[in-house]
Image (cartoon, helix red, strand yellow):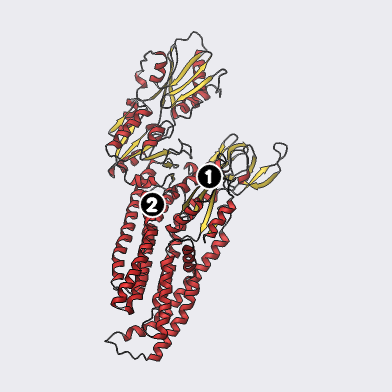
Amino acid sequence: MQLEHHESAMHDKIRLSGMRCAACAQLIEYRVRQLPGVTSFKINAISHRADLSWQPAQISLKKIITAIVDLGYGALPANQSPDQHEQRENKMALWRLFIAGFAMMQVMMYSFPAYLVAVPQVDGDLTPDLDRLLKLASLIITIPVVCFSSLPFFRAAVRDIRNRHIGMDVPVSLGILLTFFASIWATFMGGAVYYDSAIMFVCLLLAARHIEARVQRKTTAALRVLTQLTPVLAHRLISYPDSRITESVDAQSLQIGDFLLIAAGEHIPADGVVVDGQSECDESLMTGESHPVEKGKDAKLIAGAINLNGVLLMRAEQVGSETQLSALVGMMERAATEKPPLVLLADKHASRFLLIILCIALLTALAWWQIDSARALWIAISVIVVTCPCALSLATPGVMSAAIGQLAKQGVLVAKGGAIESLANATHCVFDKTGTLTYGKLKLVDTILLRPQNTDQAEPEADAISLALSSNSMHPVSKGIADALSSKLHGISALDGMADVNEIAGAGIEARLNGKTYRLGQLDFVQALHGRSCDIPSHFLGTTLSALGDESGWIALYALEDSLREDAVEAIHILQSRGKQIILLSGDRPDVVQKVALDCGITNYQGDLRPADKYDVVKLLQTNGAVVVMVGDGMNDGPVLALADVSVAMGQGAPISQSRSDLLLMSNRLTDLAYAEKIARMGLKLIRQNLGWAIAYNLVAIPAAVTGLLEPWHAALGMSLSSLLVVLNGLRLLAVNQEAKPLLILN
């Protein structure tokens, strides 16, 4: 059970069963949200999971689950294994389908002679007694289908009616029962029977729902795999360092500071650091690194990674819902739960559509009663059966879930579902430079002291100040300086008396030491402290510069170099070939930005920009009608990432739970961004195709049924195939491959 404490609210995930369409999800959400103490409740109609937040002082989790069960649906906490229940339900569903299919073949055989008699060219010899016998045989075979195979439809319909709610199972049940009882009447009183139509309707609908369920499980495979990677048990040391005796505990009950023993082949149960031991870990899920990562003392461990060999002793630093893996799972679940405008449009009208169809069927029956009373009932049944709100409800969620799963395989995590639609419509892609088009692993290549020194200890003192300042930042430039100076100064990383450390986004770091204010960062940021100009040596041109200074003037100048990502040029060319306008915006010096832009084939670029300047550029683009994708490292680009229509953060530069980003490139491959754009475009195309088909089908089928052109079995076949078509069309998204090797292999 995943619990988070935020003020007095509690959070959990609920697994639901029994939902058949968007109207079911709407009903459950509406009723649960009305319960006192429930602060939020969102259902993912594809994975059948819900995010729940409630006030324990006002209502218990048991009462919430009971309220859902009282509506006629199944519910249980997501941490409770539903395997046995699901296996039993799947087995029962297959039996219902088998009986309906077997009965359909038999009844069609009995109905065949009756159909031939009506054909003038065939000299039929079906006697009244034989006709009655075949009808009775059809009735007997139809009874198990109505009483057993159709039972889920009837239960759901009774539930919907009891809740004063019209769901898809109401017209389905009406169609089955009306056809069945009208055929019984015709069996004994004379007239045509439609047992074959009723059974065919049940068989096709059960088959369609079975396929839909399998498709749903396939499209949510990525999320299920991530959830299963969360370790259930952990081996905690009882009294470290006095002994190495362990106890098996629930991974969700771990506390920060616990010491854990990780055997070879086990998943890491929490985020933390290695205290003792040597091993290698598979962290491909979280970092995109396909090769095993060596782990020794003080190395960082990520929950969900696999300890490949050796035994590790670790100290937990982040546990439960605070781990990076939990944040990843939560991010994907929120994305799948979030409903883009197209999904909201279909959901909004699904329930109303059913009510309108029932009214049309009633009016049709009354009209045909005046024209031909013998056909009135059958035509009304055809109207009820032929309509397909299922196609409208299924048109978008399946495609969205498939898209999110496909992107997760490639190391692209979707934090907000609406980003897929925006990415498909994007016109401009704006890139940051450091940590985005480049690796962001800058190396210090040269240092110049700019202040005359009177002692031999002056240079180490300047480096020590720079090391102390840079150690307080995660910016790639600061990390490059810190790594180089740390080795030079043999690991010294702090100075006594350093105070008031403050990092200014896009500029640098400021702190006070011994009564002086020091700054490390961009040249204009340091120059603003003392107002003196600085001449840059010619051999420093084309490198990234960082300066150290105080109120008296310049102290040191550091030159760093970065390398272009190996797939940056390819990714830019792919996006350009698809008609995207590429812009490079960077806070680095114009000469450095120009070099990277020319290497990548980017003609529109700007350097020496602050975060506010980037914000203004993107704002102007949007004002002119552009749909902007902003790709950054998530460090200093907060404002512009929040502004962009789609914000993309690189995996190594941003924390996984960063709320500003719509997409997270955990793979750190820019070609995966191009793949995501391809998936988004095809996904939006499939959604539009599905919606167009569902609307066109109903516009044609309903008038045809009203005018009497369709028999009930025609309607049953059309309705089932319509739902099946939109589901299978969404599967085409799973065939879109990326040339690069996928990050995850999901079966």
Tell which residue pokes out farthest to the right in this image.
242
Where 672 sits versus 241, above or below?
below
Q: Would you identify the image quadrant in which residue 24 lies?
A: bottom left
Q: Residues within 10 Å of mark 2 (few under 14, many from 20)?
A: some
Amino acid tagged 2? Leu
Which sits in the foreground, 82 or 302? 82
Q: Would you identify the image quadrant in which residue 670 lies?
A: top left
Dot 2 or dot 1, earlier in sequence: 1
Report helix, strand or loop for mark 2.
helix
For residue 152, side relative to residue 234 (left or right): left
- Residue 344: assigned label: 2
Cα distance in 3D space between marks 2 and 1: 27 Å
Badge nearest the viewer, 2 or 1: 2
Report helix, strand or loop for mark 1.
helix
Please provide percent x and percent y for residue 106.
Answer: 43, 80
Amino acid tagged 1? Ser
Please provide percent x and percent y for residue 585.
Answer: 34, 31
Where 116 sits versus 523, above or below?
below
Where 106 sits versus 316, above or below?
below
Residue at 29 percent across and 76 percent down: it is 370
Which sits in the foreground, 108 or 667? 108
Residue marked by disc 1: 326
Residue at 41 percent across and 24 percent down: it is 507
Please provide percent x and percent y for residue 462.
Answer: 49, 16
